Image (cartoon, rainbow, N blue to C red):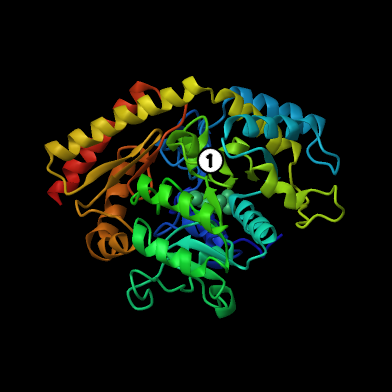
Amino acid sequence: MGSTPAPPNHNQSVSERLFTRAQAVMPSGYTRHLAVAKPYPIYADHAEGCWITDVEGNRKIDWINNFSALIHGHNKREIIDVLSAQAARLMSAVLPTEWEVDLAEILCARIPSIERVRFMNSGTEANQIAVKAARAYTGKPKIAKMEGGYHGQFDLLEASFQSTPENWGDPRRPSATAYQAGHPQGLLDLVTILPLNDIEATREILRAEADQLAAVILDPQRLQLGMVQPDLAFLEMLREETERLGILLIFDEVWSLRAGHGGYQGKIGITPDLTTMGKIVGGGIPVGACGGKQEYMSVFEIEAGDPKIKHSGTFTANPMAMACGTTSLRLLTPNAFDDLAAKGDRLRDGLAQIQHDLDLDGVVLGEGSISVLVMTRKPLRNYRDLAFAAATDLAARLPIIQKLLAEERLLTMRGGFVGSTPMTNDDIDFTIAGARRAFTRFKAL
Ligand SMILES: Cc1ncc(COP(=O)(O)O)c(C=O)c1O
């Protein structure tokens, strides 16, 4: 029990009243930085399919889907059934269950790089474990990541997530910069920052540091919500160089696994050494996973005695997440991915038409179930292009657009639209019509 609650103020909305209570018990009233909204957040009440209803009773199409985790949207019947049955049967235990074998079999069968897999509870944790595995396998201490790349809340990989012109240094040799206050220099010294899409500079850095580098990690599909995309030629170079130099290549597919039945790697035909996952693998319940060839995953094996990496965790592979993930992935057949992509194409075509008709300063990017309306025509090739754009017009426009879209009953984030399987063509057309009205008003501002 917290302190005695203040008497309710009936002039306030339900969300305002909840936020007043939250401010008395959580720093600034929040427990999740990305949920911050001014002047206060709108609290959710319930959801169905792709529609979410807030505590004020307003219904919107959910185009965020909890940062892409809810690929089946909300309250899918098969998922409710399996979770209810599993809650009644066994929520968690130290003994393994059949569900973890089922889920591991699905991932090994579908994702090209995965012969063996381990489970965790978040994408962050998956990346922590992958980094440990790479260091244990190679015996080398450093990890290379892209400038601006996001890999969750693991402080080692938070380096240079938001570098600024004051501290980012040479574009061909970016500095490792602190993201959080108190980020120790000792941790920054263990990270090498690579300039995305600069093939020559990245190759030079990898060659110069090969004897120190255990791994290169990147999201192969996107940087910062998809506004910047790695070139295929850049990914091919990374694959060739890391193989030649004895550095492991880790694809962080926590987000991009939703690109297709075999993940993004299955789509582009480039196979990393280790793959980290999360989000859709849990079907809506917190999860993480790290997999790869048996050779690299041997760091977890016990046959030779104590494993090199001793990985555990109270809720690791809990049957709720494993059952939910297995059910969710079984529903994600190749046809389901085709359908998601067709709906994505319909949305992108509609948004591109609006962009053309209204002569909006922007482009529509994305593929499959992810679409992004980038509000600038300047090419965004790396983090610095994006940071410069954000410092000028982009950052100012996105919150206004988000608000106008919300008034059309569309819940979106930073110009991004993340689709889900319950969305129908009517939902897409509703979205396009709402976006047309929102952008028409935006143009008139
Ligand atoms: C590419 C990528 N890696 C890692 C993470 C972190 O995953 P989690 O929030 O489950 O820790 C995210 C989350 O958005 C992500 O997009």
Q: Is residue 258 above or below residue 383?
A: above
Q: Is residue 83 above or below residue 358?
A: above
Residue nearest the observer in this picture, 66 or 123:
123
Residue at image location 49% in from the left, 39% down from the top: 265
Residue at image location 23% in from the left, 64% down from the top: 392
Residue at image location 69% in from the left, 35% down from the top: 104
Residue at image location 56% in from the left, 35% down from the top: 112
**Where's the N terminus, which quadrant?**
bottom right
Choose top left, top right, bottom left or bottom right for residue 397.
Answer: bottom left
The reply, left or right, for residue 411 in relation to residue 289 is left
**Residue located beneath label 1 in the image:** 69
Confirm if mark 1 falls within 8 A of ligand 1: yes
Disc 1 residue type (three-letter): Ala
- Percent across and percent down for residue 225 are 40, 50
- Percent across and percent down for residue 192 are 49, 68
- Percent across and percent down for residue 85 are 74, 26
Q: How many marks?
A: 1
The reply, left or right, for residue 439 in relation to residue 79 is left
The reply, left or right, for residue 2 in relation to residue 10 is right
Choose top left, top right, bottom left or bottom right for residue 57.
Answer: top left
Judged from the image, the secondary structure of the residue bearing numbered disc 1 is loop
Dot 1 crowding, Cα within 10 Å, few <14, some 14–19, many 20+: many
- Percent across and percent down for residue 366 are 34, 40
The reply, left or right, for residue 104 in relation to residue 182 is right
Residue 430 in sight here: no
Residue nearest the observer in this picture, 188 or 9:
188
Residue 186 in sight here: yes
Q: Is residue 419 above or below residue 275?
A: above
